[in-house]
Every structure is written in structure tokens, then in C-alpha cells.
Amino acid sequence: MTGQTSPPPPTIKVQNLSYAFPDGSSGLQNVSLSLPAGARCLLIGANGAGKTTLLRLLSGKRMAPAGTVYIGDNDPFTVGLEGVTYLGLEWVLNPIVRSDIGVPELLKSVGGDHYPERRDELVRILDVDLEWHLHAVSDGERRRVQLCMGLLRPWTVLLLDEITVDLDLLSRHNFLQFLKRETESRSCTIVYATHILDNLAQWPTHLVHMSLGKVKKWGEMSTFEVPRTDGGEEGNSRLGQLVMSWLKEDLKERGPRNARKAEGLSYQNLEGKGGYGQESRPE
Ligand SMILES: Nc1ncnc2c1ncn2[C@@H]1O[C@H](COP(=O)(O)OP(=O)(O)OP(=O)(O)O)[C@@H](O)[C@H]1O
């Protein structure tokens, strides 16, 4: 090796990360996990489990407490978040990509000319038409242009928050294969929160299972055993069966969401005062 310092491998480490939203409600509780460089990790959990909250904390969109998040052994909040790319909902709602603007102009605006090979590869893989104008394309076509834009700069940590929903099956497959090749050909790591497991069975190297703001399980794919099912799930892959069993288990543990509200109402009726927003709000 020469004396040149190369960037540290993009490992992701989270240690006892707890987070409360500005309104005081709990977002995450004692989350810990560790992913090696080159991991392709699926973040799994029911709606409201805390996946977006975790991704936003990893990306710096929300401030994590000091000493709880490390990217490449560095606390990104002290040394900066260079190389960390988060593609989530607010990014896909950006009004610019609904205006009468052409694809080459958009790609240039995010540095396309500096990375011509990546740009051309992404245009090919996502099957983007350079003559599209973004006010006159379908949702899925717009999404493909956005993915080209978002992935153009060679990130080292990519945090994806379910942004492939409106891609057709082949585009999604090509996109995921591109990401797989990226992790195999250079030093980079991906965390992908998704509910859509079609054709994903061979993709992840790691899984993280979240429920109610906690990480229940995490680890390498090979460490998870698919439980025996109670039938009716023949259409699912082994990954699908595993996730289905987790979601059923989570629902059983927490009960239906509306149960708490029903409790709150009867509480209010019984006491004749209080209700939500009072000190006496039921847990
Ligand atoms: N700004 C906020 N203030 C208070 N609570 C919030 C806020 N944002 C999210 N929550 C709550 O935090 C919980 C976790 O939300 P989060 O968006 O992280 O879930 P998720 O796992 O990404 O869900 P989904 O699969 O539906 O995208 C939810 O119960 C949500 O209502």
C-alpha cells in the first residue's frame, strides 16, 4: 500500500439509537445493528414500524444523538455525510420533475457531464428516453428519470425508501441488478426499505426486521430460517414467507392499531374528562 489515505469502507453501525419526534412521541428505541461494506440490506417491517425514521436518521435528514450512528467508523454528524445518498418520498415529490424540462438538462443539473459513463449506463439500464419532457410522462417514466438523477453520483452508502413502487417488473429487476453489480464492483453499501419482495429473493445479503420503533432481528440472510407456514402462502418465495411470518408475529404482539383508540374512548367516557392530549392519556 502507498501512503495515500483511502476512504474507510462504508460500514454502517448503529448503537443504542433512540429517537423522539419533535412532538415528544417515541420514534426509535435502542436500535442497534451493524452492516459490513458491500451489504445489500432489506429493511423489513409493517407500516409505521420505523423504517423511514431510521433511514432519515442514517442519512442525516434527522439528527441522531452523538455516538449512535457510524458510517465507515466515523460519526457522520461530526465529519460530514459525503457519499451518503438518501432517496425517499420528499425527493420523489420534488416539483422540478413535473415541469416542462428535458431529460438531458435534468441529468446535467446533477452532474451528468462529470460522470458520462455512469449517466449513459443508467439511461440504458432504466430505459430512459432522452427526448422525454417531464410534464408529459407517466409516473413510472418520471420515476426512472429520478432514479437516474439520484444514482448518478457514485455514492458509497445508498438509503432507499421504497421508491421503486411504480416501476414495471422488468425496469425494477434491471434497476436492482444494477445496484447488485455496484456493490460487487466497488466499495458501497445499500439499505433498502421495501414492502415489495417480488424477485428479491436472491438480492439481499442482510435483513433487518423492525417493529414498533425497535429492531427485532438483524443479520445475514443465511442466518434466518423460514418457519413452517400454516398454508395459503404457496405463491410466496422463501423470503416472502419469512417476512409474512414476521408481520403476523408483529400484529399478534401489538394487536390491532385501533384497539388503543377504543381504549382511549372508553377511558374518556368512564372518567368524564381527559382523553387524548392529557397527562392521563392511556399508554
Ligand atoms: N413527524 C412525526 N411526528 C410524530 N410521529 C411520527 C412522525 N413521523 C412518523 N411518525 C410516526 O412514527 C412511526 C414510524 O413511522 P415511519 O414513517 O418511520 O414508519 P415506516 O416503517 O417507514 O412505515 P411505512 O412502511 O408505512 O412507510 C409511525 O407510527 C408514524 O406515525
Image: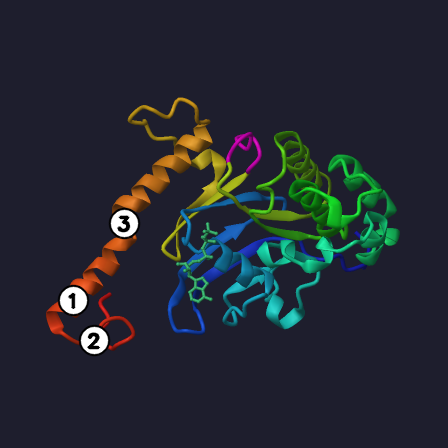
Give the magenta-colored segment's residue range: 197-204
Question: Which residue has dot 2 on it?
Answer: 274
Number of marks drawn: 3
Q: Residue 258 vs residue 119: left or right?
A: left
Crowd band around label 2 with a 10 angstrom C-alpha radius: few (<14), some (14–19), many (20+): some
Q: Residue 107 vs residue 67: left or right?
A: right
Could you tell me how far apart the alpha carbons at marks 2 and 3 are, in whole angstroms?
A: 23 Å
Could you tell me the amino acid type at mark 1?
Tyr
Which is more N-terminal, label 3 or label 2?
Answer: 3
Query: Does the CB distance between marks 1 and 2 fall below 8 Å?
Result: yes
Which is more N-terminal, label 3 or label 1?
Answer: 3
Residue 93 is situated, as x and y percent measured from the top left of the image, at 63, 56
Image disc number at residue 184 = none
| Membership of 212 in magenta stretch | no
Q: Main secondary structure of the magenta part?
A: loop
Can residue 86 be seen from the camera position used here? no
Question: Quick one: 85 or 124, which is closer to the camera?
Answer: 124
Residue 126, image quadrant: top right
Question: Which residue has dot 1 on it?
Answer: 267
The single residue placed furthest to the left in the displayed view is 270
Q: Foreground mark, 2 or 3? A: 2
Q: Foreground mark, 1 or 3? A: 1
- For label 3, the SS is loop
Residue 86, image quadrant: bottom right
Could you tell me how far apart the alpha carbons at marks 1 and 2 are, in whole angstroms?
A: 8 Å
Which is more N-terminal, label 2 or label 1?
Answer: 1
Answer above or below: position of 106 versus 231. Answer: below
